C-alpha cells in the first residue's frame, strides 16, 4: 500500500484510488444491471441501454420507487480514474506487485477498447437473395436522406444528408439544404421517429399535410428501436419557388420520390444509414438445417463469394459462430427469410459490425491472464521457498540436538 499523503490535495487524490470507491462503483454497476434488466420488459433493450448505460445519470425504477443513480458514463468514467490512480499510480512498486500491475493494465486496455467501440463502431446488416451481390450495409437505427441522378445508369453519385441534420425537425420547424452542384434545394420538415402512411378520408382530421389523399401519422415509439419506421416531409425549391408539391418520404418505401429539375430526373429517399464495405459479397447458396421432424432451424449458413477491390474472388462460408473477419469488419450469419414457411424467395441476413477495437478484448484478456499467472507463480514460489527454509531450519535444529545428545 502506498504511503498516506499528508497534504489536502494528496488526500483528495488518494480517495479517487481508494478500495472503498471501487466497492461503491461496483455496487452501482450491479444496481444498473439489475434494475435495467427488469425494466427491459417494459421498454426494450435498446431504450434501456441508452437510459441506463449511455447516460451520466438515470432515474431508475425500483418497484414503486424511482431512484437517482449515476449512469453508465459516470460510473465507468470514474471507475477508470479509480483504476489508474489506485492500481497503477499509487500502488507500491515491487516484485510482489508486478502481476497485480500487469492485471490492472489489462483491465485498463479493456475499458479503453469499450470506449473506442462505443465512439466509433457501426452496426448493421446486409440482405442478399441467391445470386445477388452487395457491397454496403445498412444501420439498424440511424436514418439519412439520399439524393441521386435518377437517369444515371453507372457511376451514380449520391448526395447524403445525415440524420443528425434533420432528426430534430418537428412541428413547424424547417431546414433547407443547399448544394452548388444541384439545380434545386431541399426543404425538410416534420421528422417522425415512428410513423405510418394513412388515408386522409378515413382518419378524421389529419395532423400532418395531405399528399394525394395520404399523410404520415405519427405513432408511439416502439421500445425496440429497430421496429420504428421513420418519415418526414420534403419539398424541392429553386430560388424560393417550389418545383414540386410537398410530399413525404417513408422509411420503407419500395421506390424513391422522383422529380424533374435542371433538365434531369432526380431521386430522393429516406433510408437507414448506409456504409460501404471494402469488398463485395455475392450469395451463392443459403442453407437452413432443421431439427429432425421440425421446422425449427438447427443451423443455417451462407456460401458466398467475397470479391475484393482488385476483382479477385474468394469462395467462403459464413456461419452463426464462424464469422468473416476482413479489413476491420465482422460479418456473421444473423437471420434468414421468409420466416415460418412464408412465401417468397429465400434470402440470407448477414449482420455487419465495423469495430476498430475488435481485437482489444482478446489482447486485454491475455494481459490479465499473464498478470494473474505471474501473481500465482510468484506466490507459489514464495510459499515453496518459505517451506524449504523452514524444513532446512528444522533439519538444522534436529542435527544440533542430536550432536548435544551424543556429547552428553
Image (cartoon, rainbow, N blue to C red):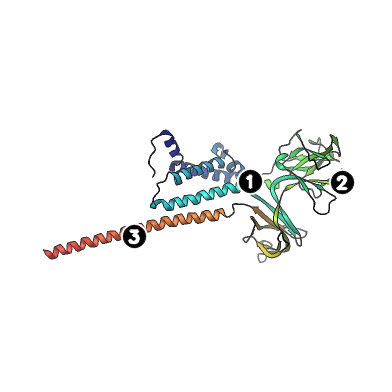
Would you say 3 lies left or right of 192 here? left
Would you say 171 lies left or right of 322 here? right
Return the disc, 2 or 3, that comes first in the chain's sequence: 2
Q: Residues within 10 Å of mark 1 (few under 14, many from 20)?
A: few
Question: Which of 126/62 is in front?
Answer: 126
Residue 164 drawn at (x, y percent): 70, 41
Residue holding disc 3: 384
Residue 309 drawn at (x, y percent): 71, 59
Q: Nearer the viewer, mark 2 or mark 1?
A: 2
Return the disc, 1 or 3, that comes first in the chain's sequence: 1
Q: Residue at x 80, y 53 (%)?
A: 155
Using the numbered discs, state the Cα–Cα distance from disc 2 to disc 3 in whole angstroms.
85 Å
Q: Is the N terminus in the top left, top right, bottom left or bottom right quadrant?
A: top left
Q: Are marks 2 and 3 in contact (CB under 8 Å)?
A: no
Is there any visible trace of residue 44 in the rendered image? no
Q: Secondary structure at mark 1?
A: helix
Q: Quadrant of residue 198?
A: top right
Residue that sits furthest to the right in the current view = 263
Q: Residue at x 51, y 41 (%)?
A: 78
Q: Residue at x 73, y 56 (%)?
A: 135
Q: Say above or below: 284 vs 83.
A: below
Q: Quadrant of residue 179?
A: top right
Q: Is the C terminus in the top left, top right, bottom left or bottom right quadrant?
A: bottom left
Disc on res. 46: 1
Residue holding disc 2: 264
Using the numbered discs, state the Cα–Cα distance from disc 1 to disc 3 in whole angstroms.
52 Å
Q: Quadrant of residue 392?
A: bottom left
Question: Which of 299/188 is in front?
Answer: 188
Question: Which of 406/184 is in front?
Answer: 184
Q: Are marks 1 and 3 in contact (CB under 8 Å)?
A: no
Q: Say above or below: 290 vs 245.
A: below
Q: Say above or below: 403 vs 112.
A: below
Amino acid at each position: 500500500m502506498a504511503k498516506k499523503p499528508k497534504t489536502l490535495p494528496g488526500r483528495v487524490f488518494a480517495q479517487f484510488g481508494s478500495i472503498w470507491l471501487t466497492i461503491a462503483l461496483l455496487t452501482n454497476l450491479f444496481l444498473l444491471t439489475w434494475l435495467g434488466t427488469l425494466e427491459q420488459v417494459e421498454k426494450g433493450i435498446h431504450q434501456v441501454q441508452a437510459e441506463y448505460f449511455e447516460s451520466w445519470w438515470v432515474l431508475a425504477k425500483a418497484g414503486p420507487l424511482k431512484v437517482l443513480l449515476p449512469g453508465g458514463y459516470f460510473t465507468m468514467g470514474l471507475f477508470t480514474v479509480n483504476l489508474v490512480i489506485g492500481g497503477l499510480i499509487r500502488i507500491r512498486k515491487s516484485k510482489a506487485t508486478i502481476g497485480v500491475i500487469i492485471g490492472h493494465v489489462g483491465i485498463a486496455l479493456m475499458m479503453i477498447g469499450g470506449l473506442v467501440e462505443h465512439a466509433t463502431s457501426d452496426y448493421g446488416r446486409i440482405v442478399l437473395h441467391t445470386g445477388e451481390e452487395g457491397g454496403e450495409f445498412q444501420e439498424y437505427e440511424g436514418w439519412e436522406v439520399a439524393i441521386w441522378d435518377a437517369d444515371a445508369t453507372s457511376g451514380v453519385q449520391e448526395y447524403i444528408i445525415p440524420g443528425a441534420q434533420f432528426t430534430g425537425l418537428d412541428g413547424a420547424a424547417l431546414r433547407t439544404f443547399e448544394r452548388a452542384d444541384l439545380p434545386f434545394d431541399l426543404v425538410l420538415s416534420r421528422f417522425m421517429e415512428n410513423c405510418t402512411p394513412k388515408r386522409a378520408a378515413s382518419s378524421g382530421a389529419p395532423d400532418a399535410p395531405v399528399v394525394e389523399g395520404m399523410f404520415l401519422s405519427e405513432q408511439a415509439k416502439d421500445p425496440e428501436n429497430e421496429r420504428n419506421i421513420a418519415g418526414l416531409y420534403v419539398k424541392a425549391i429553386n430560388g424560393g419557388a417550389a418545383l414540386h408539391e410537398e410530399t413525404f418520404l417513408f422509411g420503407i418505401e419500395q421506390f424513391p420520390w422522383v422529380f424533374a429539375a435542371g433538365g434531369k430526373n432526380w431521386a430522393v429517399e429516406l433510408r437507414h444509414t448506409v456504409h460501404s464495405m471494402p469488398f463485395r459479397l455475392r450469395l451463392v447458396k443459403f442453407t437452413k438445417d432443421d431439427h429432425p421432424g421440425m421446422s425449427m432451424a438447427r443451423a443455417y449458413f451462407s456460401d458466398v463469394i467475397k470479391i475484393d477491390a482488385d476483382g479477385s474472388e474468394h469462395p467462403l462460408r459464413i456461419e452463426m459462430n464462424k464469422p468473416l473477419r476482413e479489413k476491420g469488419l465482422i460479418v456473421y450469419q444473423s437471420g434468414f427469410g421468409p420466416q415460418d414457411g412464408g412465401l417468397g424467395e429465400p434470402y440470407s441476413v448477414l449482420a455487419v459490425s465495423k469495430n476498430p477495437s475488435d481485437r482489444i478484448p482478446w489482447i486485454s484478456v491475455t494481459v490479465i491472464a499473464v498478470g494473474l499467472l505471474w501473481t500465482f507463480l510468484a506466490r507459489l514460489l514464495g510459499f515453496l521457498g518459505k517451506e524449504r527454509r523452514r524444513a532446512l531450519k528444522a533439519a538444522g535444529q534436529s542435527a544440533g540436538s542430536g550432536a548435544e545428545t551424543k556429547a552428553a
